[in-house]
Image: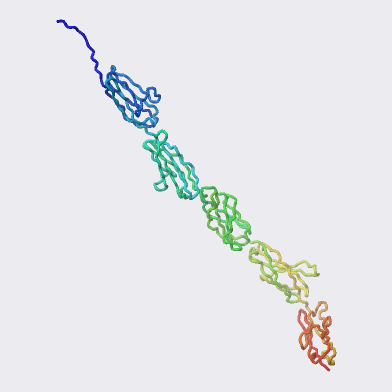
């Protein structure tokens, strides 16, 4: 029996069998990602890549798919290359194989890490003490960053300041962390450079330094000294202290003491930034102490400690003595008394009083002056003057610096040098009939004829006392004669006549009787 020779092709379909699965991958953003997937099967499986369930197009410019067929149409390999990865490229990637028999898939997780960056930096702050102030910093990164604050290169310890944090995501889903540092109340030591530092496992980044400045009134200046004095001024110098983080614009000067012992003056602005000043309009020869305060844009700070005592120089007196009495003590001497210059007008130590003397020769005319210096504080006895002569006097006071002005003038006259009046009674006993008129007569010859009014005061007295002109008593113009009318018993008795001059007085007696 003869057999036919023939052949038959047997085709065996094979279910897609994954030989190489893509690996879980972690990269830093902007790095390339490469995933590989291989499978065998028959018919040759087709391949599709998916990201988070979404098909990846072969025309995707960012994500490039390359597929190769290997080993006689049994094996297929594919790679997915993602260039310059971004955070949104993270997630689950799947490679899906399928043929007539069925389909199979493999997956991997891609993690895209994000180096921290600061997207909101703190900004420069000036704050007036003790007002509160906040500094804000926001960072983005993955793994989510932490934030710490650094001041003047030192990490700020917990509980030093209040820090509030809030998490979120940016517009592409990268985690964010916002940190708000609050300083309240602000004090001087809060001034400094603050830096926000964001970090994760990849890296740490810092914001630019930001200056927090606490503004306040300046501290009190120190080392207030005086460098020079005159009779009305003191030159001061001092050292500035902390300016309160705001430029000093001027200083304020106060003084205490002076002639009226001022507690502290109202304050004098220097209108200058210079740490020196000349205080004027002071009183000569007076003790002063000074203190200084600084002023900036915030205000005027505390005053410094007081300086040592400065004594202004002497000056000539600004006031004058006041003559209170001019009394003749003899025909050639006059004593003058005065009140000394008031204390607040002396301007130093009074070392001398000088008296100006001018002889009056007519009502409106004075001879040139001559001077005498007093050896006592408030009086002088002027001798060697002319008898019965009028003089005009003024007094001036002097310090070591010079003479002051003369006082107002006051006049006085020496005594005349006549003796007491010499009286002569014309008739020492006068006897007249009852009812008649009696005349009593006294003469007073001049002792010093060249001096007028040698007996300026002339007085009659009788049994009833001092006599004045009446209908009964008649006095002559020169008062040397006394006429008494209608004499009666009551009119009899002793009558006296007294004449007085600047030296003394003389009295004579006349007896009146009836026949």
Residue lying at 61% horizontally and 60% vertically, measured from the top left? 312
Could you tell me residue 162's position as x and y percent?
42, 47
**Coordinates of residue 391 in the picture (x, y in percent):** 76, 71
Does residue 99 show up? yes
Figure quadrant of residue 22: top left
- Looking at the image, residue 479 sits to the left or right of residue 319; the answer is right
Pick the residue in front: 17 or 341.
17
What color scheme is it?
rainbow
Tell whether 123 sits left or right of 398: left
Q: Which quadrant of the rendered structure holds the N terminus?
A: top left
> Which corner quadrant of the image does residue 440 belong to?
bottom right
Q: Residue furthest top?
A: 2
Viewer-closest of 115 and 229: 115
Residue with the most extreme left position: 1
> On screen, 218 above or below 443?
above
The quadrant of the picture occupied by the C terminus is: bottom right
Residue 31 lies, with reference to residue 341, above or below; the image says above
Provide residue 132's location: percent of width, then percent of height.
Answer: 47, 48
Q: Nearer the viewer, residue 88 or 429?
A: 88
> How many numbered circles are shown?
0
Tell me if I can see residue 426 in this picture: no
| Residue 403, percent from left and from top | 69, 63
In the rendered image, the residue lying farthest to the bottom is 515
Residue 468 quadrant: bottom right
Residue nearest the viewer, comparing 405 with 66: 66
């Amino acid at each position: 029996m003869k057999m036919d020779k023939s052949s038959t092709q047997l085709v065996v379909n094979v279910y897609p069998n994954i030989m190489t699965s893509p690996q879980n991958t972690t990269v830093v953003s902007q790095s390339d990602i490469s995933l590989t997937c291989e499978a065998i099967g028959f018919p040759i499986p087709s391949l599709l890549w998916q990201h988070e369930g979404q098909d990846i197009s072969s025309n995707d410019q960012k994500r490039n798919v390359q597929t190769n067929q290997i080993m006689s149409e049994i094996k297929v390999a594919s790679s997915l290359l993602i260039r310059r990865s971004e955070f949104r490229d993270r997630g689950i990637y799947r490679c899906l194989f399928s043929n007539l028999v069925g389909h199979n898939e493999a997956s991997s997780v891609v993690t895209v890490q994000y180096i921290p960056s600061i997207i909101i930096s703190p900004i420069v702050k000036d704050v007036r003490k003790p007002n509160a102030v906040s500094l804000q910093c926001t960072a983005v990164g993955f793994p989510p960053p932490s934030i710490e604050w650094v001041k003047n290169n030192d990490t700020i310890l917990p509980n030093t300041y209040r820090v509030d944090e809030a998490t979120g995501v940016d517009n592409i889903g990268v985690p964010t962390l916002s940190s708000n540092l609050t300083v309240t109340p602000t004090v001087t030591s809060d001034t400094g450079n603050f830096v926000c530092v964001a970090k994760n496992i990849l890296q740490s980044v810092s914001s630019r330094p930001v200056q927090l400045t606490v503004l306040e009134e300046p501290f009190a200046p120190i080392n207030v000294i005086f460098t020079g004095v005159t009779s009305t001024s003191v030159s001061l110098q001092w050292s500035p202290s902390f300016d309160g983080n705001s430029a000093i614009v001027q200083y304020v000067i106060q003084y205490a003491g002076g002639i009226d012992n001022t507690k502290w003056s109202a304050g004098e602005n220097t209108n200058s930034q210079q740490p020196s000043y000349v205080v004027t309009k002071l009183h000569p020869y007076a003790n002063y102490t000074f203190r200084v305060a600084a002023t900036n844009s915030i205000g005027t700070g505390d005053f410094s400690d007081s300086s040592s005592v400065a004594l202004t120089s002497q000056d000539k007196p600004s006031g004058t003595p006041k003559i209170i009495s001019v009394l003749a003590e003899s025909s050639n001497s006059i004593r003058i008394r005065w009140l000394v210059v008031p204390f607040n007008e002396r301007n130093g130590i009074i070392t001398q009083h000088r008296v100006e003397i001018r002889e009056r020769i007519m009502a409106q005319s004075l001879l040139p002056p001559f001077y005498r210096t007093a050896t006592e504080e408030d009086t002088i006895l002027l001798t060697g003057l002319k008898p019965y002569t009028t003089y005009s006097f003024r007094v001036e006071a002097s310090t070591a610096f010079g003479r002051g002005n003369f006082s107002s003038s006051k006049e006085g006259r020496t005594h005349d040098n006549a003796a007491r009046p010499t009286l002569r009674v014309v008739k020492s006993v006068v006897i007249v009939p009852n009812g008649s008129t009696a005349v009593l007569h006294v003469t007073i010859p001049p002792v010093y004829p060249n001096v007028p009014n040698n007996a300026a005061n002339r007085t009659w007295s009788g049994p009833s006392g001092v006599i004045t002109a009446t209908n009964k008593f008649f006095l002559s113009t020169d008062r040397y004669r006394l006429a008494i009318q209608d004499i009666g018993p009551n009119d009899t008795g002793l009558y006296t006549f007294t004449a007085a001059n600047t030296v003394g007085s003389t009295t004579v007696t006349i007896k009146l009787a009836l026949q």
